Image (cartoon, rainbow, N blue to C red):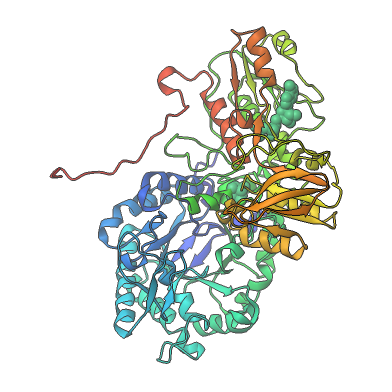
Amino acid sequence: MDDRPFYLCPMSKANPYAILFEPVKIGPVVAPNRFYQVPHACGMGHLRPQAHSAMRAMKAEGGWGVVCTEECEIHPTSDLSPYSEQRLWDEKDIPALSLMVEKVKAHGSLAGIELVHNGHMAPNLFSRLPALAPLDIQLDVGYPKMARAMDKQDIKDLRAWHRRAVKNAKAAGFDIIYVYAGHNMTITQHFLSPRYNQRTDEYGGSLENRARLTRELLEEAQETAAGDCAIALRLAVDEQMGEDGIQAHEDGRAIVEHLAKLPDLWDVNVSDWPNDTISARFEPNEGAQVEAMSFVKETTSKPTVGVGRFTSPDLMVKLVKNGVLDLIGAARPSIADPLLPNKIREGRIEEIRECIGCNICASCDSLGVPIRCTQNPTMGEEWRRGWHPEIIEPKKSDKSVLIVGAGPSGLECALQLGRRGYQVTLTEESKDLGGRALGESKLKGLSSWRRVADNRTHELQQMANVSIYTNSRLSAQDVVEFDCDKVFLATGAKWRRDGTGRSHNFPLTDLGGMRDSTPDTIMLGRIPSDPVVIYDDDHGYMGGVLADHIAACCNDVTFVTTASVVSPFTINSLEQDFIQRSLVEAGVKIYVSTQVLSLKPGCLELQNVYGGEPFEVACTEFIPVTARTPDLELKRELDKLAPDLPVEVIGDALMPGLIADATFSGHLAARSFEANEEEIETGKFMREMPSLPPTANF
Ligand code: ADP
Ligand code: SF4
């Protein structure tokens, strides 16, 4: 057996994906293959270096030839607090970053770092320093403060900070160091873009002038790296704003032509972040950015990497063969399946855990907490819980397990217990496995969400120790008769139909003869009657997606929400703007900051949440999206019938939440089953503690 690391193993020419495992020279370094984890946010950053290192190391272990950090602030004038990104303000930040480099390189991968100055996107709330920009402009972060137009000295200072960060990144051991001009979050992009750069000096006006700062940073980075590291340029080649911004085949192309020879690698995408990391709901296809980036390889001889939620190896091969990309970039596919390259290499294509494009991963960065993923419950848990996507402790006994309910939590729990080797029986009332993942995937734009069920079902069906029964609604008596050693109840939750929610602690009074539905009935295929009112007092994604879905089949749709925008949670998943636009385009009447006072025959009585005169809107069918109730009927019956039976409730039946919460709950329960008292996993995980100097003076 060839015991060399996989990235050095020759691959059969007959393997249709062999081209993806060819090494690629990037300036002075060589990527062992074409799988490139582009920089992506993870909510860990400088505050959680051990968690961060372990998470990136898992990607390297999974075969990603290049693994990068998230954006890395180069100076306290680019302070993104309260978000935790990477930091290389000075040499004191080197050890935390070296840790990641060491762990990534241990698997033979290259480590990349994305240096950044965020300009007026950085509020400097921690450092309290003035923010910098090409022009005097408001901070773009909801804080009433202006960024200052940079003078010549500011520009000189910025270049010096960047040079110092390159020097320190090199000292930390990075192979690839970025100059970053993308996502509308970087000062270099702001200088490139005429809408921000209205300067009249040599840094403004012509394209050559607007690109001067980027050019200087690239040249100085190359000089500082001195042939030891590759210098990459991450560039937004299209701002997706038409004539108001940079356009791919016009000034985007001109910028690439102008700087073509300077970087060792082009990492190209579209901006801003919501456009680049667009959710599957608004861009269902893989490779959506290919058209915008297709010109890049025509204009430069340097290798090019780009993203597009790529999970299909056939498409990856096509892009390389057609000369569109040299390296297959991925953020989300590497989060959903850190082992994706290895699976392709080993011909385990069916086992790829495909990203569903829900953007819950991105929402963690927005919320300032460590990353998580709907498809991959181990994401973010590599260090603190020691979880691996595919390795799990074998069973400790021959105990048998019954799982009732095959939604995301039941499926995940069954899968992990099956992997551990337990005898598992999974029962489901419906004819198909998947629970809410199947139901929600029937709503407009969410078809990819059924992958949560498909990937797991496929694997479960291969397991000899797992028996699956569909069309099997179990009663408490059935459960007892199963005579198993442990029962997991994954019976889910139902949307309430009585309007109880954030604003109404008690049910709305009688429905006045009005027809009513819930998100559950719509997911079962019900088409409501006009005029229909969706009342969102939940503020998650469901209200907005339901309105969009219903607007496709009804003419008179009104969306009422107590929130001040449509679906506020989705600001975190980078979708809110798209959602509200979509409802406006679909002709949905929107009332924000509005509550339902009462239901009357043929209408609803509404009022602005801040007061004012009540008013009425026509309504034949009322759909409250307000709260969910755990389905604990079976639990209550079991408590009466067999109080000594070991029963554990998981998933939405325990805590209605996101699908990501349900898969996590199922995973945690499976890992915790038969764990020793001291290793019991519930609630137990490592924390990164601030270290105090020995001389700390209290
Ligand atoms: P979760 O997100 O926690 O997995 P879901 O609501 O998606 O929850 O799934 C719960 C599943 O449990 C549904 O598919 C439902 O049909 C099933 N279920 C509920 N009660 C029973 C029962 N008594 N017997 C079998 N299946 C059940
Ligand atoms: Fe993909 Fe959703 Fe996982 Fe992000 S959270 S990687 S979008 S499946």
Q: Does any portion of residue 333 appear in the rendered image?
A: no
| Residue depicted at 65% across the width and 52% down the height | 607
Residue 494, compared with residue 207, is above or below; it is above
Q: With 203 as the anchor, is 309 left or right in this view?
A: right
- Residue at the outermost front position: 613
| Quadrant position of residue 148 | bottom left
Q: Residue at x 61, y 22 (%)?
A: 421
Residue 599 appears at what percent x and percent y? 75, 43
Image spot of residue 217 (x, y percent): 39, 77
Residue at 65% over, 65% down: 320
| Figure quadrant of the C terminus | top left
Q: Position of residue 603 (x, y in %)?
A: 79, 49
Query: In this rendering, is residue 159 above or below 106?
Result: below
Quick check: 213 left or right of 555?
left
Question: Is residue 315 visible to us here?
Answer: yes
Q: Nearer the viewer, residue 662 or 14?
A: 662
Q: Answer with left or right where residue 268 lies relative to residue 551.
A: left
Q: Nearer the viewer, residue 101 or 570?
A: 570
The percent position of residue 661, horizontal first and vertical second, equals 58, 37
For the residue pair 207 and 446, the one nearer the viewer reads as: 446
How many circles with numbers are drawn on the protein? Answer: 0
In the foreground, 99 or 186: 186
Task: Name the residue rendered at 30%, 56% in the picture.
Answer: 94
**Image quadrant of residue 157?**
bottom left
Q: Quadrant of the N terminus?
A: top right
